[in-house]
Image (spheres, grey):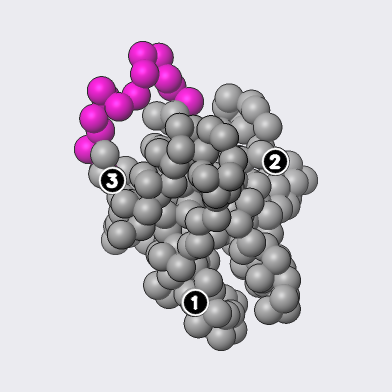
C-alpha cells in the first residue's frame, strides 16, 4: 500500500483535495470497510491539513525547540517539527472521521497513538472537536477556524521534559520494541525456571534477530 494526499489551488484560489492511492485489496479482509476508510481518511486529511499547517506556520514554529528531544526519544517518528504537527492533526482528523462514521472506542485508539510516539494526539483531537462545536454554532469553515486549532495544539505542547519522558514510556504494543535499538530484553534463567526454553526463548530469539 502506498499513498499521499496532495492539494492544488486553482486560479480562483479554491483548494482541490485529492487522495492518490495504490491499494492492494488482498491485504484487506472482505467487507473491511472501516480499515480501508481509515487509510483513505488519513491520506485525504493530508490534502487539507498540510496547506493549512504551511499557511499558519507562524503559530506552530515556536515548538521547534522540542524536536531535538523528541527525535532523541523516538528517532523513527520525528524528522522535523513540521512533520510532528501535520501528522498529529492528520491522525486526529482520521480518528474523528472513523468515530463519526463507524463508532468505536476512540480513547483506546488515541492511547495507541501515544504509545506509537504521537504524544500530543489528545491536543490535536480536542482541537478538531472544538472546530465541530464552532461549526454547529456559527457554521465556521475549517480553514477559517484552523488558527484556533493551531493555538489549542500549541498550548498543549508546553510541557516539561519529565512529562515528555513519562508519555514516551513503553506501554505497548510489543512491536514497538523493534523501533528502539537500545531495548534490553530480560527473561528468566532457563536453567532455573521450567518452561522458559520452550515457551519464552523462541520469542526472545525472534526479537534479538529483528533488532540485529
Q: Is residue 24 left or right of residue 63?
A: left
- For residue 72, which numbered disc appears in the image? 1
Q: Main secondary structure of the magenta part?
A: loop
Where is residue 150, by image quadrant?
Answer: bottom right
Q: Is residue 109 left or right of residue 52?
A: right
CA gap, disc 3 and disc 1: 28 Å
- Can you say which quadrant of the picture contains the C terminus? bottom left
Q: Position of residue 18 (x, y in %)?
A: 32, 45
User: Quick one: label 3 or label 2, which is nearer the N terminus?
Assistant: 3
Query: Is disc 2 placed on a helix, strand or loop?
Result: helix
- For residue 32, which numbered disc appears in the image? none
User: Which residue does the image show at 37% across and 61% down from the upper left?
Assistant: 13
User: Quick one: label 3 or label 1, which is nearer the N terminus?
Assistant: 3
Q: Is residue 121 magenta?
A: no
Q: Position of residue 81 (x, y in %)?
A: 48, 74
Residue 83 at least partly seen: no
Q: Which residue is mark 2?
A: 107
Q: Is residue 31 magenta?
A: yes
Where is residue 7, by image quadrant?
Answer: bottom left
Q: Position of residue 123 (x, y in %)?
A: 68, 59
Compared to residue 131, the image places residue 102 above or below, namely: above
In magenta, the rendered stretch is 20-34
Residue 210 at least partly seen: yes
Q: Which residue is mark 3?
A: 3
Amino acid at each position: 500500500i502506498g499513498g499521499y494526499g496532495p492539494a492544488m489551488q486553482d486560479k480562483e484560489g479554491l483548494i482541490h483535495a485529492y487522495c492518490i492511492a495504490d491499494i492492494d485489496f488482498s491485504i484487506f479482509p472482505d467487507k473491511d470497510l472501516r480499515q480501508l476508510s481509515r487509510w483513505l481518511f488519513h491520506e485525504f486529511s493530508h490534502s487539507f491539513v498540510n496547506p493549512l499547517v504551511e499557511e499558519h506556520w507562524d503559530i506552530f514554529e515556536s515548538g521547534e525547540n522540542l524536536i531535538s528531544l523528541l527525535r532523541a526519544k523516538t528517532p523513527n517518528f520525528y524528522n522535523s517539527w513540521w512533520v510532528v504537527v501535520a501528522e498529529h492533526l492528520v491522525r486526529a482528523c482520521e480518528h474523528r472521521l472513523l468515530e463519526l462514521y463507524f463508532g468505536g472506542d476512540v480513547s483506546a485508539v488515541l492511547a495507541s497513538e501515544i504509545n506509537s510516539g504521537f504524544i500530543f494526539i489528545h491536543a490535536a483531537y480536542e482541537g478538531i472537536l472544538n472546530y465541530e462545536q464552532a461549526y454547529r454554532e456559527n457554521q465556521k469553515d475549517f480553514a477559517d477556524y484552523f488558527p484556533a486549532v493551531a493555538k489549542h495544539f500549541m498550548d498543549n505542547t508546553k510541557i516539561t521534559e519529565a512529562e515528555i519522558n513519562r508519555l514516551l514510556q513503553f506501554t505497548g504494543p510489543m512491536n514497538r520494541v523493534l523501533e528502539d535499538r537500545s531495548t534490553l530484553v530480560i527473561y528468566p534463567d532457563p536453567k532455573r525456571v521450567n518452561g522458559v526454553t520452550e515457551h519464552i526463548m523462541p520469542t526472545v530469539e525472534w526479537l534479538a534477530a529483528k533488532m540485529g
